[in-house]
Image (cartoon, rainbow, N blue to C red):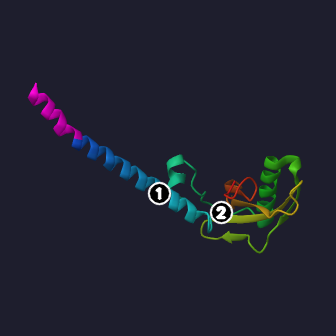
Amino acid sequence: MVSRSKSKKNQKPWSGLLGGFVVIVVFAAVMGIALEEMAAGEGEYRRTVWDRLTGKPVVPVGRAQVSVQLAVEICRQRVARQLGRELLQSSFDQRSSRYNTELQVHTVFLDLTLEGRERDDIYARCDVSAVNRLILEYRLQNYGNMFWG
C-alpha cells in the first residue's frame, strides 16, 4: 500500500504542470486573437483569425459593380432596420468613407441622429463589397456602450 501512495504523489506534479501549461497556452491564444481584433477595428476591412474561426465569409472576388452611392444606401437600410423609429437622420460622412481598390470594399461612415440622443456623436460603419453588395462588417459607435456595438 505504501508504494501506491508514492506513485500517486509522483503523478500529481506532472498533471499540475500539464494543466498549468494548457491554461497558459489557451490564455496566450485568446490574448492574440483579442489583440488582432482590436487592431482590425482601427483600419480598413481585413479578415482576422476570429473571422476564420467563426466562419465569416471571405471578401468576394470578381468585377466591382457597386458604386459608392449604392454602398451608402445599403448601409442606410441596414441602420434603419436595426434602429427603426429611433433613427431620425443619417448623413454620409464623405471625409471618413473610402474605397479599398485591392479588396473592392467600400467603407462607409454615416453620422446618425437618434431620438432623445440628438447631441450624442453616434455613427455607423459598413464595409460593403463592391462585387456582390454584401455588408462584410457592420458596427455602431457610441450607441450602446463605449465599445463598438
Nearer the observer, 106 or 79 = 79
Is residue 15 shown in magenta?
A: no
Residue 80 location, x and y as percent? 83, 51
Classify residue 121 as left or right of residue 28.
Answer: right
Tell me the amino acid under the disc marked 1: Met
Magenta part, dominant SS: helix
Q: 10 Å neighbourhood of mark 2: few (<14), some, or many (≥20)?
A: few
Q: Check disc 1 and report the residue beneath it.
A: 31
Tell me the amino acid under the disc marked 2: Arg
Residue 22 location, x and y as percent? 34, 47
Residue 102 location, x and y as percent? 60, 69
Query: Which residue is drawn at the image coordinates 74% and 72% (left, top)?
Result: 96
Q: Secondary structure at mark 1?
A: helix
Query: Which residue is drawn at the image coordinates 85% and 47% (left, top)?
Result: 84
Q: Check disc 2 and report the residue beneath it.
A: 63
Residue extent of the magenta highlight: 1-12
